Image (cartoon, rainbow, N blue to C red):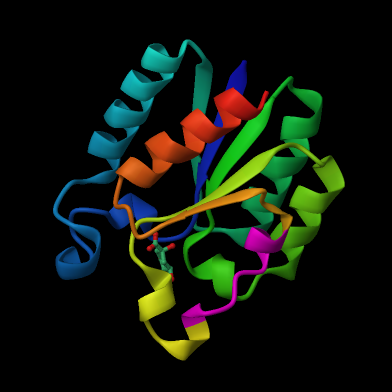
Amino acid sequence: MKLLIINGPNLNMLGIREKHIYGDRDYDALCVMIRGWAQELGCEVELYQSNHEGAIVDRIQQAYFDGTDGIVINPAAYTHTSVAILDALKAVQLPAAEVHISDVTKREPFRQISYPGMACQAHFIGLGFEGYHEAMKYLVSAK
Ligand code: DQA
């Protein structure tokens, strides 16, 4: 089983950006944790981070051809704007789980819509880094 973990814009700035919201651990720490969880779950994992919407669309399309079995995605700010990422997820029809580190349901009104989330079968919101673990467990058990 091969999982693709996609992180959107500014998540490479974890540990620097708005620590009171996202915590003080950085993106590398998140990657180390995700690799550990993949070992625990006995699956392969690939990590991808981009600040560019089209690059994320390209990576989702590539997943259709490269043997990816499931996608964990934190689209970050593109959550609230990107029909293109929604359409890419719908196009590849791979099992997908949405993650948000913060509890977007309790934040600004503009964060209350998730376009990519409409193509995801599960949502892990406001659980911090643990949300990625829960999303990975969900995809492994759904397979
Ligand atoms: C986020 C929430 C988004 O609203 C925000 O734009 C992010 C991170 C989260 O993980 O909590 O960049 O996706």
Left or right for 30, reference 123: left
Depicted 103 relative to depicted 127: above or below: below
Residue drawn at point x = 23 percent, y = 68 percent: 21
Residue drawn at point x = 51 percent, y = 50 percent: 50
Picture quarter with ligand 1: bottom left
Residue drawn at point x = 34 percent, y = 51 percent: 12
* Magenta stretch holds residue 114: yes
Residue 131: x, y in percent? Answer: 38, 46
Residue 117: x, y in percent? Answer: 63, 60
Residue drawn at point x = 46 percent, y = 60 percent: 9
Residue 47 in sight in this render: no
The quarter in which the N terminus is drawn is top right
Depicted 23 relative to depicted 32: above or below: below
Outermost residue to the right: 91
Image: magenta residue range? 111-118
Q: Nearer the viewer, residue 33 or 58?
A: 33
